[in-house]
Image (tube, rainbow, N blue to C red):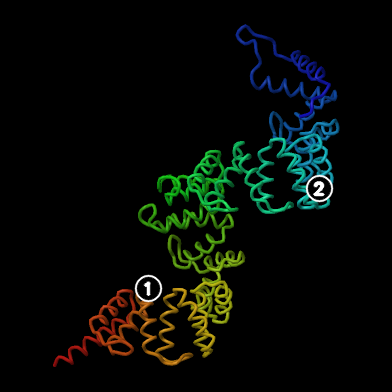
Amino acid sequence: MKSTPAVSTLLAALLAAQLFLPTARADDTMPSADEARQLALRAYTEAAREGDAEARFKLGWLYEQGQWVAKDPVQAAHWYRLAADQGESVAQYNLALLLLNGSGVAKDPAQAAAWLRKAADLGLSSAQLKFSELLDRGEGVAADPAAAVAWVKRAADQGDAAGQNNLALRFLDGRGVAKDAAQGLQWLNRAAEGENATAQANLGQIHMDGLHGVAPDPVLAARWLGKAADKGNPVAQYRLALLHEKGLGLARDVKLARHWLETAAQAGETAAAAHLGLLFESDAFGAPDPTAAATWYARAAEGGDALARNNLGAMHREGRGVAKDFAQAKKWFLLAAEQSEPLAWVNLGLMAEQGQGGPKDEAEAQTWFQKAAEKGLPKAQGRLGWLLYKANRHPEALVWINRAAEGGDTSAQNNLGVMYEQGKGVKKDFTLAARWYRKAAEGGDKFAQNNLGVLLRDGIGVERNYGEAITWFKRSAAQGYLKAQLSLAQLYERMAAEKK
């Protein structure tokens, strides 16, 4: 803050305020806290009216914060402006923020930029960084990335850790300067050593993920993330939790992982809330808890996390942890789809294909599956292929079903087996049919388990094997596929007839 020559004015006001002290009592010679605050306010007001810049700044701050007085942004702007006109740099900065936000004054980015420039010229690093943001965006001033970097550099050179972190990221990303990982890491380390929590979190992420030419080092990652997490940085808390969960760089500790995830989620880190949903869906904390999972997904979904929105939609669609509600499911799937979440495209396709929340619409389903299939999702590729197969577009169907099958989608593997068994879109080949049925059956597909059982029972494409056929029929039937139960009965009937 710029010093002012009017110290005597402020001192005189403070002394004058003593005249308003209540009459001293034998047991109470000093004013109460409330009385002392009112005396201070009166003294600051007198000094401000007499022209003291520091007092004017103080009054502006009190009115902006609502301390000792009712919050009043108009009065705050008034006193800040008077102090700013006298060269008070912090007042200039605070007035600029009011002008940017339209608080107590009309919104005026150009005026804000002018005041920030004045404060920046006086060496106020916070103003230098804020002015650089306006130069980046071209808000209230012509966009000038090079000038933005220059102001950030001035703040960094003054030892401002936030400025050093800012400059580091610009060098690492090549924003306004030539990309230079070495310089970026140098500045980032300086900021982190200067106890800047954001820089510590950034440095921890670099060591965790092995970014910018740095080899992954979970021990260093844990060190920096731990420092930032202790300072309350939610991103660092989330990433530190992942290290605890996986036992990377420190001992595996699921309880600590949960602690840091919940701490980060409570602070608004949506990725942490979404991850908690995943862990509660699994057995990470003991028995799966779909209700808790849905609660955390909902928090992350409301915060805009696309994957959490998709997962919350899936829980509504299936009635897990929440009441089954196709309307809610579709709502969350659509929100996630707008954020280009491919899993949401798949789920919207499944709802349209199955007529959930509305009439069946295979054309709509195909549109959604196409979007996700082009992103490489095997489930979407398989469903798209099957719709094309049903529409007798066998060559196109084969392309997508084959991609899905190779990608590990068991439903597509079963369907590819069907195509080879029936000779539609491909040359009939029972051996290949059996091979794909087996892949899908081993992956748990109940339809493939029954289909493989039939080929084993009849000795088609494979050597006849009643014992193995019975095994696959039973596995399929155990998953609720009634046709497998019928297949099993027919096999037992055949075996009985053959023993006569």
Q: Could you tell me which secondary element the residue under label 1 belongs to?
A: loop
Q: Nearer the viewer, residue 27 or 353?
A: 353
Where in the figure is residue 24, as x and y percent of width and height? 67, 9
Give me the residue at 69% from left, 37% from top: 160
Which residue in the structure is indicated by mark 1? 443
Q: Residues within 10 Å of mark 2 (few under 14, many from 20)?
A: many
Sequence-wise, which precedes: disc 2 or disc 1? 2
For the image shown, how many numbered marks are present on the structure?
2
Q: Is residue 56 above or below residue 227?
A: above
Q: Nearer the viewer, residue 214 or 432?
A: 214
Which amino acid is tagged 1?
A: Gly
Determine whether, in the image, residue 156 is placed left or right of residue 221: right
Q: Could you tell me which secondary element the residue under label 2 belongs to?
A: helix
Give me the residue at 76% from left, 51% from top: 136
Q: Is residue 459 above or below residue 151?
A: below
Instruction: Specify the quadrant of the image occupied by residue 155.
Output: top right
